[in-house]
Amino acid sequence: MKVKKLKFISLLLVLAMVLAACNSDSSSGDGNSDKDAKLDIFSWWTGAGEEDGLNALIELFKEKHPDVEVENAAVAGGAGTNAKAVLASRMQGDDPPATFQVHGGAELNEGWVAAGKMEPLNDLYEEEGWEDKFPKDLIDMVSKDGNIYSVPVNIHRGNVIWYNTKVFEENGIEVPTTFDEWFAAADKLKEAGVTPLALGDKEPWTATQVFETTLLGTLGTEDYNKLFTGELSFTDAKVKEAAETFKKMLSYINEDHSSRNWQDASQLVAEGEAAMNVMGDWAKGYFVNDLNLKVKEDFGWTETPETEGEFMVITDTFGLPKGVSNPDDVKKFLSVLGSVEGQDVFNPLKGSIPARTDADVSKYDAYGKETIEEFKQASLVPSLAHGSAAPEGFLTKVNQAVNIFVTQKDVDQFIDSLDQASSELK
Ligand code: GAL
């Protein structure tokens, strides 16, 4: 009896081993070591104003690859406020998502690539013939030491003011282009009982974004860039001037700014309680898809003061982390994301412009068309608030400094904190 039982168990074991071998055989052909692994796509695109583009892209992928099981692993919170921490703990615990949202520039290159956590994608770029389909500047933002590490799905513009057209009309406001014009408009609006500038800095990055656009307007492209290479100090008189301007702007915001997020602040503009907000063009996706506003009719846009011809670039990209068990499925997803079709289902909903230069312009609204053209002409600068200009350690400290500055408004202390934080840049 005992012998029989043992034989039976051994037989079962052998069977299990054969089955396991068959499984790995059937998947070894396509490079996925675990054919049951889900394609979990990690981002912070969830909820209003964020998720529509991603959902459309996932639908397109499912149509093309119905055999691959996809899991949308998004973690809520603008600009990755919560997602970046979750991602870091997954990466440290050797449990990387199949692919994840990461900004081109320092966040990718000085972060995950430098830590040896990403696979190069040069072969995929070659297979797909992508090297001349994305602007060279953008490929540079996702490359380190001659290797390409991710695929850009979009280009967002960060230096944009969104305004309520009726509020502007009713109060006789001309669209401001300089800081002086902006303050004159803000005074007029304040007198009329309208909040000039909506801010929702419950997540501090939104205030950092107002500050970085003020820095760009005050310093210009060249000096703005020098701040992050260490060629220009944060104690420079121009930075102080930008901080003073930022401080002045903060005297025109809604009182409840610290309890609102970016969507809530954009709502103030949509409803006409506030006249303007400074936000990346994901706000356009939110205005149009979620609040049903009409481009140009209900809201208009312009560059943040004194940044005409400058384009603050925010690019969302996806790569292939080392150690995932389904790299071929990830590459299939990246191929769809990097295709003309993929970019054109995603970007019109997201508010961004396509990263590819050969996308179908007719699919974009008036804002998109204008921005596609401007991107070609403009001088490009990386956003600090959205991870491209400087490593995460520096950004975290800047967000803290900005957050304190919004309430304390102490320019010297602010400059001091920025200067101290800049040790992270070395
Ligand atoms: C940015 C991201 C955008 C948008 C925004 C608000 O960092 O690049 O795609 O999602 O945050 O969450």
Image (tube, rainbow, N blue to C red):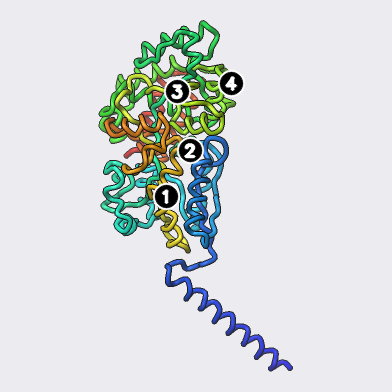
Q: Earlier in the sequence, mark 1 or mark 3?
A: 3
Q: Residues within 10 Å of mark 1 (few under 14, many from 20)?
A: many
Contact, mark 3 vs mark 2 (Cβ under 8 Å): no
Of circles 2 and 4, the one toward us is 2
Which image quadrant for residue 232? top left
Q: CA distance from mark 1 to mark 2?
A: 14 Å
Q: Earlier in the sequence, mark 1 or mark 4?
A: 4
Of circles 3 and 4, the one toward us is 3
Q: How far across and down, in percent of the image, does residue 10 sit?
A: 62, 87
Q: Earlier in the sequence, mark 3 or mark 2?
A: 3
Q: Residues within 10 Å of mark 4 (few under 14, many from 20)?
A: few
Contact, mark 1 vs mark 3 (Cβ under 8 Å): no
Q: Which residue is most to the right? A: 1
- Residue on which disc 4 sits: 256
Q: How far across and down, in percent of the image, does residue 213 sit?
A: 38, 25
Residue at 41% x, 55% y: name it: 320
Say which quadrant the N terminus sits in. Answer: bottom right
Q: Secondary structure at mark 2?
A: helix
- Residue on which disc 1 sits: 337
Question: 362 or 137: which is nearer to us?
Answer: 362
- Residue on which disc 3 sits: 296
